Image: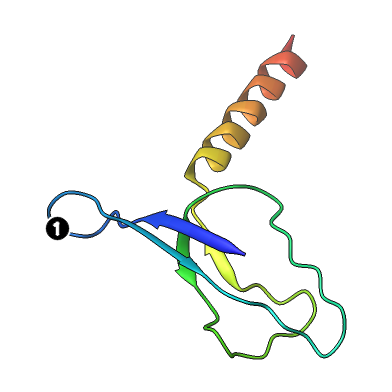
Amino acid sequence: MSAGWTCRSCSGPASLYSTSATLRADKRATVTARTQGGIRQLLKEEGDWVDEGQPMAILEDDEQRIAFEQAKARAGVMSAR
C-alpha cells in the first residue's frame, strides 16, 4: 500500500511526501478506502495494532462536504416546488 499527500500547512512551496508500508495480519486482512483524498491526519504508525473497522487515517473531505451541501440545497429547492 502506498500513499501520497501534500503538505498544506508547510511554509514555502507545497511539498509532496509519499510513503509505503507493508501490512501484515495474523489472519487475512483487507484494507480499503471508501473514497479518495489527501491524508489530513495519520492515526496509526507502522507496527501499531489495529482492530477491525478501526480508522487508520483521516482523509481531507472538503470537496465531499461541499458536494453534499450542494446536493442538500438542490433537494430542498426541488421539494419546495
| Identity of the residue drawn at 69% across and 85% down | 50
Residue at image mark 1: 11
Q: Where in the figure is residue 12, as x and y percent of width and height?
A: 12, 53
> The residue under label 1 is which amino acid type?
Ser
Q: Quadrant of residue 68?
A: top right
- The foreground one among 2 and 8 is 2
View extreme (top): residue: 81
On the rendered structure, is 1 left or right of 3? right
- The foreground one among 2 and 55 is 2
- Please say if 65 is above or below 23: above
Q: Quadrant of residue 71?
A: top right
- Please say if 66 is above or below 28: above
- The foreground one among 27 and 79 is 27
Q: Where in the figure is residue 9, as x and y percent of width and height?
A: 25, 58
Dot 1 lies on which element?
loop
On the rendered structure, is 52 left or right of 6? right
Where the C terminus falls, by quadrant?
Answer: top right
